[in-house]
């Protein structure tokens, strides 16, 4: 009997690679499990507008963050990807259905694609670029990463329905804190 989730993974694998490695050739008993583990993070799609890589985004994220009239016009919510290119206006793309959703089709501001405030970074606990930078200007450091990490541990985050990427924001928060420290952290540091 075939495992249906593994069959999908085999297909996704071949779409992404030109030369499959022997151990992943579908139909062999060992391949079934290793392919299942791979798909989640490796699967990408190329955005038609910027040629950047998009990461898979789940149906639950789309349902929560895409504006209703736009959502209703989409045939299937499977096979969508999130474009991470800051300068690209596309937020969600689906090359198979030829559907490209832009910033104006999404209910929230997509922080990585905005240059004017407010620039959201953490959607679950309301951290913006402004709030992080302000902390750094005031006290020389930001508590964003520690505060968010603590809440993630107690299961209070809802990234899947609040963050347009559908993923944890901590990587983005870390980058923003580093950027803030480079810009405003120096005058507070004493050697
Ligand atoms: Zn793009």
Image: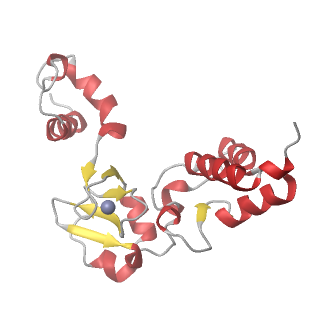
Specify the quadrant that holds the C terminus. Answer: top right
Q: Residue at 15%, 41% (x, y): give it.
A: 15
Quadrant containing ligand 1 reads bottom left
Reply above or below: 154 against 116.
Answer: above
Specify the quadrant that holds the N terminus. Answer: top left
Q: Position of residue 85 (x, y in %)?
A: 39, 58
Q: Residue at 41%, 60% (x, y): give it.
A: 60
- Answer left or right for 77 relative to 10: right
Q: Please tell me which residue lies in front, 150 or 191.
A: 191
- Answer left or right for 47 relative to 157: left
Q: Residue at 67%, 41% (x, y): give it.
A: 153
Q: Position of residue 4 (x, y in %)?
A: 20, 38
The colour scheme used to paint the residues is: secondary structure
Q: Position of residue 184 (x, y in %)?
A: 75, 56
Reply above or below: 25 against 44.
Answer: above
Q: Please tell me which residue lies in front, 88 or 18.
A: 88
Q: Please tell me which residue lies in front, 40 or 172.
A: 172
Image quadrant assignment for residue 128: bottom right
- Answer left or right for 2 relative to 93: left
The answer to whether residue 128 is seen in the rendering is no
Q: Give the residue furthest to the bottom.
A: 69
Q: Residue at 25%, 28% (x, y): give it.
A: 35
Q: Position of residue 10 (x, y in %)?
A: 17, 34
Image quadrant assignment for residue 68: bottom left
Reply above or below: 69 against 17.
Answer: below
- Answer left or right for 6 relative to 171: left
Image quadrant assignment for residue 133: bottom right
The answer to whether residue 74 is seen in the rendering is yes
Q: Please tell me which residue lies in front, 129 or 66.
A: 129
Give the number of callouts. 0
């Amino acid at each position: 009997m075939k495992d249906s989730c593994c069959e999908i993974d085999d297909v996704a694998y071949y779409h992404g690679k030109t030369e499959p490695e022997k151990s992943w050739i579908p139909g062999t008993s060992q391949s079934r499990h290793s392919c299942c583990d791979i798909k989640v993070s490796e699967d990408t799609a190329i955005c038609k507008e910027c040629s950047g890589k998009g990461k898979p985004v789940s149906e639950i994220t789309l349902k929560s963050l895409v504006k209703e009239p736009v959502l209703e016009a989409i045939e299937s919510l499977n096979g969508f990807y999130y474009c991470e290119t800051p300068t690209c206006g596309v937020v969600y793309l689906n090359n198979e259905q030829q559907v490209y959703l832009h910033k104006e089709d999404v209910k929230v501001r997509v922080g990585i694609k905005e240059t004017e405030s407010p620039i959201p970074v953490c959607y679950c606990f309301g951290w913006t670029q402004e709030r992080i930078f302000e902390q750094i200007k005031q006290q020389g450091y930001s508590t964003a990463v520690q505060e968010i990490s603590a809440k993630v541990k107690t299961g209070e985050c809802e990234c899947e329905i609040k963050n347009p990427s559908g993923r944890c924001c901590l990587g983005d928060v870390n980058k923003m804190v580093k950027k803030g420290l480079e810009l405003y952290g120096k005058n507070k540091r004493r050697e």
